[in-house]
Image (cartoon, rainbow, N blue to C red):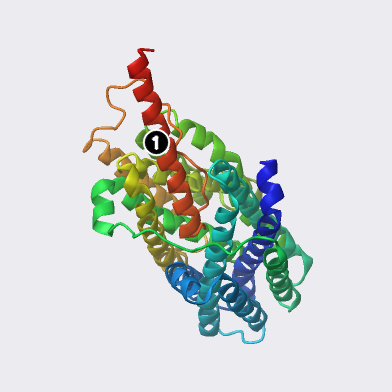
C-alpha cells in the first residue's frame, strides 16, 4: 500500500477533493431546492438528471479522450463543473438546475474516467488491487467529509456553492502537476445486454434495482431530510450515515462473499436492508433511530454493488469478465436515472416516509427475486464444501467503467490463479 500511495498520492488526493466537492453539491441541491420552494417531484428530476449525465458521460468520455487526449478533456470538463456550480445560486429555476445537473454529471463522469485511467496506469499488476482499495477508501472519505462542509455556511446563500467549485478547481492541480505519464486509453468491447442477462439474470435485475436504491440514497436523502423538517446539521449527519455504513459493512460482506454461496448472501443482505428500510418507515420521526437506520440501510445496500458483480462473474468465462463491465455499469445507471422520479412521485403522494417505503420495497423485490432465482438454477458451488474464493473487490456504485473494468481484470487474474493452483494440486496429488 505504501508503494501505491507514494506513486499515486497526487491522483488519489485530487480524486478525494473531487469527491468532497461532489458530495457537498449533491446534498446542497436538496436543501437549497427546498428553500426555493421546488416540489419533491421537481427535486427528484434534478437528482435523476445528474445520473443521466453521468451515464452519458461515462460512455462518451473514452471517445473524447482518444480524440484529443487526457489533459484537454480533463481541463475542459473541469471548467464546466466549476462554472455550473457557481451558476446554481444565480439562476434558481428547477429546469435550469436540471440542465446544470446533466452538465455536472456528464463532466464529473468524464473527469473520473480520466483520473481513474491515470491511476490504473500508475499501478503495476502486483499493486493494482491495492490501488483499487486506496481509490475506494478516498472515495468514501470524500463522501463523508463533503457532508461535514454543509455546516460551514447558509444553504440560502452563495458560500456553500463556492466551496465545491473551489475544491473541484483545486483537485486538478495535484493531478495535472504530478509526474505521471499520460496513459494509452483502450476499452474492451462491451457484452450485449441480452447476453449479460442470459448469463446472470439475478446480476442483471439486481443491478437495475440497486441503481434505484443508490440514487435514492445519494440523490434524494437530503430532499427527505428537508421534507422531514431536519436541520442542516441533522441532514449532514443523516446523509453521512449512509456512507459510513458503507465503509463499515463493505469488508465483512466481502469476507462472507468469498466464503459462501453468493446468492444466499445477496438474498439475506437485501432482506435485511428491506427490514431496515421498514424500520425507517415506522420510526422515522425519531432522529437517533433515523441515524441507526441510515447506517444499516447504507451499509447493507452499498456492498451489494460489488457483490452483484462478483456473483455475475461466477457465471462468466474469464475472457468475458472485463467485457461485462460496460453492461453492468450501464444497467445500474438506467436504474439510477429511473429511481428518483418514482421516489419523488411516491413522496409527493404519502409524504417523506415514502423515502423509506421506496427503499424497503426495492430491496424486498431484490431479495424476493434472488430467492426465486435460487429455485431456477443450480449454484456454481453445488456439490462442493469449499467456497473459498477471491473475486470480491470493494467498489462503490459511483465508480466509472474504468474502475469496474479494472476490478473485472483482477477477478479474471484471481480466477486463473486459482485454476492453476487446483490443477497443480491434482498433478502433485496434494
**Closest to the observer: 143 or 386?**
386
Across and down, in percent, residue 408 comes to: 43, 47
Looking at the image, is 5 positioned above or below residue 226?
above
| Residue indicated by mark 1 | 415
Across and down, in percent, residue 110 comes to: 52, 69
The residue drawn where x is 63% and y is 79% is 79
The residue drawn where x is 30% and y is 57% is 191
Which image quarter: residue 289?
Answer: top right
Question: Most extreme residue toward the bottom, as rendered?
Answer: 91
162 relative position to 333: left or right: right
357 relative position to 103: left or right: left
Could one spot residue 328 in this view of the protein?
Answer: yes
The residue drawn where x is 44% and y is 53% is 405
Looking at the rendered structure, the number of numbered marks drawn on it comes to 1
Label 1: element kind: helix
The residue drawn where x is 39% and y is 51% is 322
Amino acid at each position: 500500500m505504501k508503494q501505491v500511495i507514494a506513486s499515486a498520492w497526487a491522483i488519489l488526493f485530487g480524486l478525494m477533493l473531487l469527491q468532497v466537492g461532489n458530495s457537498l453539491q449533491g446534498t446542497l441541491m436538496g436543501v437549497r431546492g427546498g428553500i426555493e420552494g421546488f416540489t419533491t417531484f421537481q427535486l427528484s428530476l434534478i437528482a435523476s438528471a445528474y445520473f443521466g449525465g453521468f451515464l452519458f458521460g461515462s460512455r462518451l468520455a473514452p471517445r473524447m479522450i482518444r480524440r484529443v487526449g487526457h489533459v484537454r478533456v480533463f481541463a475542459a470538463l473541469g471548467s464546466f463543473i466549476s462554472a455550473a456550480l457557481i451558476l446554481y445560486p444565480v439562476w434558481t429555476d428547477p429546469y435550469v438546475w436540471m440542465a446544470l445537473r446533466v452538465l455536472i454529471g456528464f463532466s464529473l463522469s468524464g473527469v473520473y474516467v480520466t483520473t481513474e485511467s491515470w491511476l490504473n496506469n500508475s499501478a503495476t499488476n502486483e499493486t493494482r488491487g491495492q490501488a483499487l482499495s486506496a481509490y475506494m477508501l478516498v472515495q468514501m472519505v470524500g463522501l463523508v467529509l463533503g457532508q461535514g462542509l454543509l455546516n460551514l455556511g447558509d444553504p440560502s446563500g452563495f458560500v456553500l456553492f463556492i466551496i465545491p467549485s473551489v475544491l473541484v478547481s483545486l483537485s486538478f492541480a495535484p493531478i495535472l502537476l504530478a509526474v505521471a505519464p499520460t496513459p494509452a486509453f483502450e476499452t474492451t468491447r462491451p457484452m450485449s445486454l441480452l447476453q449479460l442477462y442470459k448469463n446472470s439474470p439475478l446480476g442483471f435485475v439486481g443491478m437495475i434495482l440497486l441503481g434505484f436504491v443508490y440514487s435514492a440514497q445519494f440523490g434524494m436523502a437530503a430532499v427527505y431530510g428537508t421534507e422531514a423538517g431536519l436541520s442542516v446539521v441533522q441532514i449532514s449527519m443523516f446523509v453521512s450515515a449512509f456512507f459510513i455504513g458503507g465503509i463499515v459493512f463493505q469488508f465483512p460482506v466481502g469476507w462472507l462473499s468469498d466464503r459462501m454461496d453468493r446468492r444466499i448472501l445477496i438474498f439475506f443482505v437485501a432482506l435485511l436492508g428491506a427490514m431496515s428500510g421498514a424500520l425507517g418507515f415506522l420510526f422515522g420521526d425519531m432522529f437517533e433511530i433515523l441515524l441507526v437506520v441510515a447506517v444499516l440501510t447504507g451499509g447493507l445496500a452499498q456492498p451489494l454493488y460489488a457483490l452483484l458483480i462478483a456473483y455475475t462473474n461466477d457465471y462468466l468465462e474469464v475472457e468475458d469478465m472485463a467485457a461485462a463491465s460496460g453492461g453492468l455499469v450501464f444497467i445500474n445507471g438506467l436504474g439510477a436515472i429511473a429511481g428518483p422520479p418514482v421516489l419523488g412521485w411516491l413522496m409527493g403522494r404519502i409524504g417523506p416516509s415514502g423515502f423509506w417505503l421506496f427503499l424497503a420495497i426495492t430491496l424486498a423485490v431484490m431479495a424476493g427475486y434472488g430467492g426465486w432465482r435460487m429455485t431456477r438454477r443450480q449454484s456454481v458451488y453445488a456439490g462442493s464444501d469449499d467456497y473459498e474464493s477471491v473475486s470480491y473487490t470493494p467498489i462503490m456504485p459511483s465508480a466509472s467503467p474504468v474502475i469496474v473494468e479494472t476490478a473485472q481484470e483482477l477477478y479474471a487474474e484471481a480466477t486463473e490463479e486459482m485454476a492453476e493452483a487446483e490443477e497443480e494440486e491434482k498433478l502433485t496429488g496434494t
